[in-house]
Amino acid sequence: MSKECVSLPGAVGPYSAAVKAPPFVFVSGQLGMKDGSFVGETIEEQTKQALENLKTVLEAANSSLEKVVKCTVFLKNMNDFSKMNEVYATFFTENPPARAAFEVARLPMDGVVEIECIALT
């Protein structure tokens, strides 16, 4: 299988933003950051930005949110699940992808949410 790495500026570690392995693209976890800083402290603000970042990476990989087949959501606090869902639902309005959500002890840069996905190319 061949693979192609998609890199965008702003990664917080030594990894690719996405890896294309047709017919899939695997997108690394996206935080609610823009220009190196969190867009806000709330779960709603960070979820929206994480999904905007996911959308940007998918487009750079010649894919889109409409082609997402699986998402994984990592939450700092599971009590934020319903608020995250409200924002998430505005990005996946029809035929939402499969998804898992987990509470984790800590996220990079002390974010409150991180979202990764697998999409079709």
Image: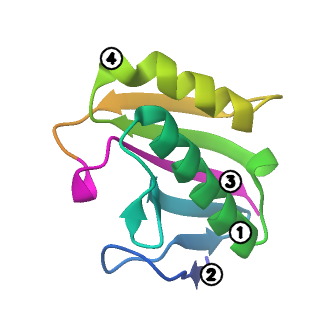
Identified at 77% across, 57% down, the residue is: 64
Q: Position of residue 51 (x, y in %)?
A: 59, 48
* Distance Cα–Cα, label 3 vs label 4: 28 Å
- Which mark is drawn over residue 79? 4
- CA distance for labels 4 and 2: 41 Å
Residue 105: quadrant of the picture: top left
Q: For residue 43, which quarter of the picture?
A: top left
Q: Which residue is mark 3?
A: 119
- Which amino acid, by three-letter code, is at mark 3? Ala
- SS class, disc 2: loop
For label 1, the residue is 22
Q: Secondary structure at mark 4?
A: helix
Q: Position of residue 65 (x, y in %)?
A: 74, 49
Q: Dot 3: few (<14), some (14–19), or many (≥20) neighbours within 10 Å?
A: many
Pinpoint residue 68: horizontal percent, then vertical percent: 70, 47
Tags 3 and 2 in contact by the CB under 8 Å rule?
no
Disc 1, disc 2: CB below 8 Å?
A: yes
Would you say 74 lies left or right of 110 here? right
The stretch of residues the image draws in magenta is: 107-121
Q: Residue 90 bears which disc, if any? A: none
